[in-house]
Image (cartoon, helix red, strand yellow):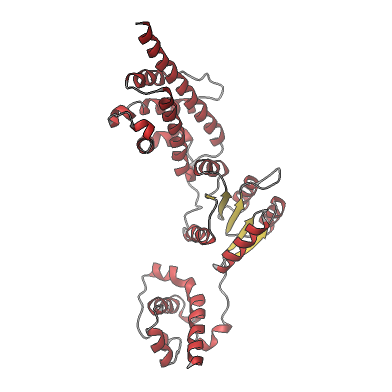
Amino acid sequence: MWGAIAGLQRFLRQASRRFDWCQRPARQAGLEPNSSILSEVFQLPTWAVLLLSISPNYPLLKRNCVQYWAVSPDFCQPYSTWNTLPAMKKSRILLADDNDNIRTVFQEGLEGCGYEVVPVASVVEALRLISTEQFDVLLSELHLPEASDGFTIVNAMRHTQPNAATLLLSSYPVRQAAMTALLLQADQVLVKPIGVAEISEIIRKKLSDSSAHMPVNKERVAAILERDLNVTIENWMSRVERTGELTATSLTYQERTGHLPQLLGDLVRRLRLAPSAKSPISCAAREHGILRRKQGYSIPMVVEESRILQVTIFNTLQNNMGSVDFSTVLLDVMTIADEVDSQLKQAMLGFMETAAAKSAS
């Protein structure tokens, strides 16, 4: 009896390893299981099939067996010969982190999830491997203790192996991580702390999406902001509604957001100017400051609205990271920051102008 149980456990372990690879192509082929696959194809004894049928893993195991047989029937062999079957190819991960403990934990954890992990502790090692070996995934710490850091590694991987998924580890808050991903062309920035299981799931999804690294039409930041104007306004409003300091002043949706199309329009026009062109002053921003004074805003409230606008704009770019033209993005990001600050200045001038006029009267 104990020998039968041990044999069943061994079967379950080997079946899980042998059949997992074929689930995706089988689903794509629309295959359905049948009840005789375990005994007829894999020649399992009756006692094993009966024991398996009362196992909670039985439905999944049976489906996997069917998929395995349907996708590659010539590769199906009796259970007794499984140890001689060739091993399936594992996805390769280049893991770059200077922290020995983190590197060890991630390596062991990801290898336990079925990946082949090649660990390195420096940028130089990572660059050497990128130029000499093939990888499916780059998982790199952003801040490495060298003159060149994760930026260099991502850039090298993007140019040398453009189809590899690129993931960066960072301790930055979410907002800063989003901007980092935008500037570094990484597929995603993973904010620490993060567990191995979550990283493994993210990698699995990246690798299963065959279109993740397909070439796309690149857009300038101005075009993206113009296209996603309404989405940006809605996201801005959503953030404002979660800010008690601002919602303390009761305004309608139109009263709250009516200035944004003009301000964002001024920003888009500024982005399309030549770098050497003189920056125009936003009259809409000045009018906005005057209006906010009449609506009962304080100066800190106007500043907070401007801060939320800048965060929302960067979030819009993050959501369009796959189509951003990175050849100009750094200049565009600098222009956005400068224009939002300039608009805030004009809003403050309008705000104070109204206050001064009121005092004079």
Name which residue lies at 54% across and 60% down.
196
Depth check: 34 or 243 in front? 243
Where does residue 251 sit, x and y in percent of width and height?
29, 29
Where does residue 286 sit, x and y in percent of width and height?
40, 18
Name which residue lies at 44% across and 26% down.
303
Position of 85 relative to 191 (above/below)? below
Where does residue 256 sit, x and y in percent of width and height?
32, 29
Quadrant in the rendering for residue 227: top left
Name which residue lies at 64% across and 49% down.
153
Quadrant in the rendering for residue 282: top left
Position of 176 relative to 42 (above/below)? above
Q: Residue furthest left?
A: 252
Asked whether residue 272 is in view, the answer is no
Left or right of 254 in this view: 104:
right
Position of 268 relative to 83 (above/below)? above
Where does residue 287 sit, x and y in percent of width and height?
37, 18
Asked whether residue 198 is in view, the answer is yes
Depth check: 274 or 16 in front? 16
Q: How many marks?
A: 0
Position of 228 relative to 101 (above/below)? above
Q: Quadrant of the C terminus?
A: top left
